[in-house]
Image (tube, helix red, strand yellow):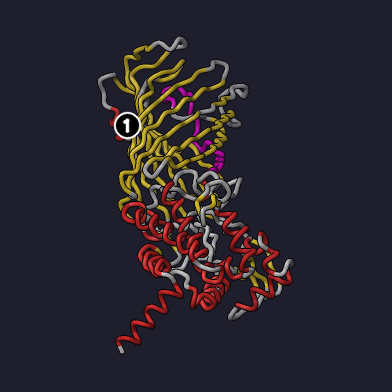
Amino acid sequence: MKNILTIALLFNLLNNSFSNIQVDSFLKSVVNNGRVNYGLIQKEKTKQLDSLIQNLNTDLINSNITQSKAVYLNLYNLLVIKQIVTNYPINSPNEIPGFFDKTKFTIKNKATTLNQLENKIIRPTYKDSRVHFALVCGAKGCPPIQQFAFFTDSLDQQLDSVTITALNDQSFIRFQKTGFAEISEIFKWYIADFGGNEKGIKNFINKYRLTNKITEISYYNYDWTLNDFKTVSGSNVATYTPSVLLKKNQFEIQFFNNLYTQTAWRNDQGELQKLGSRGSWNTLMMTFNYGVSKSARFNVGLDINLRSTHNDTEDSKAIDIFKFAQNDQSRTTISTIGPKIKWNPIKKITNFSLQSAFWIPVADSLENKSNRPWLDYDRYTWWTQLFYDKSIGAKYQFFGELDFLLRIPKIGSNVPSSEIIFSTPVSIFISYFPSPKSTIYVQYQYAPTITSYPSFYMQAGIGGKYQVLPQLQVEASYTNFFAGHTQGAGTTFNVGLRYISK
């Protein structure tokens, strides 16, 4: 009996290669529900991953074409994981320059890219449309990665299985009504592998559909968001940067409190001038955002700004503003309310987005009124922001922001209609992630303003964020206005609370 078991085991090893068995064990430890735990691999399994890739490549050199098919599929998926882990944390494989067509790996002693591996070797050699549901590109738009490796002796059944799984997944084949479904752009990109036309695509899909056959199709936008395990049950501090949009039906509620206080300002020569008093302004921005597109490329939202001001002696405290008095030195009211939109204009660059808000003044005489202090701009504000972030290695991230602020006097206000204000602040943040749930950052901003009296300020500061619950994070920061012309020379103290639904 022992001899029979030994022979069976040896036969299994010869047919499948020991490397494929090792890959199977590796995937079972890092894949869950179609997501990859890249953070775990980076922390504990990089050497194991490198060893598996090297062993698979050795197997290719020593095997025939038939035996190589499973090895090629496993190798492709591990090379994708390798690139992501090397550059992690990121939000999308598209953030890595040349991910598919420039980064080269040694495969059978030849420098080969992922595109070449798929389109010059796997597709033309095996001519099997099912491989499109076995090869996973590291994005959520791909068919879900499986928690197993591919084996030579069971490959045909495995390819049937992954194809059936993908083509019966409601998020991959999206039925809108009887007979009509939105399908992945994979079918459009590789239409030659599915009969060369829409009829061939429908026939292929229906062959593997268990219910609800399709008669009409359209294509939804590919989701290039990283298929990261942390987006399911881990951190959202690094994932949901200001550049990233919410998925359809996902929502965000954010409270951000900014307290600015000053006892000096800088004149038109940039010289520091004492005011002899303390002026403080506090803004509580309440924001609601909602995802409305399946491709996570369009969000809508609403901003509500609660403003307070307090003027007092130079030795008074900035926190006195939180007494919320209403007199000739203090004032508190909801000053502006406005809708906003957020859009990802280039679908392959998921870390670039545009946000535009239009704030409407809802309180009277915000700027100048006898016996009442200046509280806010009594103007319509059109605020457009361009966001971009980029991971730097495994622990650092660059974030840049370019703003366009246009303020036009409100109809009926006592502000002259000619007093239009235009400002273009530029902000830079460098973040460090000591853990997946926390970040520390430094920031710098240069903000020129164009009016009849041009001015500018520069501020710099430090801050941090921490995820206290799976969907809840807190933030705190401090900045100092260290240079400028015809602007305040104060400091800010900021705290924020952000909730992001699953």
Task: Answer yes or no: is residue 493 visible.
Answer: no
| In the image, residue 275 above or below residue 417 | above
Picture quarter containing residue 412? Answer: top right
Give me the residue at 36% from left, 46% from top: 497
Q: Is residue 421 left or right of residue 436?
A: right
Give me the residue at 60% from left, 80% from top: 211
Q: How far across and how far down the image is residue 42, in percent?
A: 36, 52
Q: Secondary structure at mark 1?
A: helix
- Of 109 and 456, which appears nearest the observer? 109
Q: How far across and how far down the image is residue 101, in percent?
A: 58, 49
Pick the quarter of the image with the C terminus.
bottom left
Name the residue beneath numbered marker 1: 321
Q: Is residue 482 left or right of residue 383?
A: left
Inspect the magenta stretch and tell me whether residue 152 lies in it: no
| In the image, residue 403 above or below residue 439 | above
Task: Tell me how many marks there are.
Answer: 1
Inspect the magenta stretch and tell me whether residue 371 lies in it: yes
What's drawn in magenta, residue-wise?
351-374
Give me the residue at 31% from left, 35% from top: 322
Q: How far across and how far down the image is residue 192, in percent?
A: 70, 64
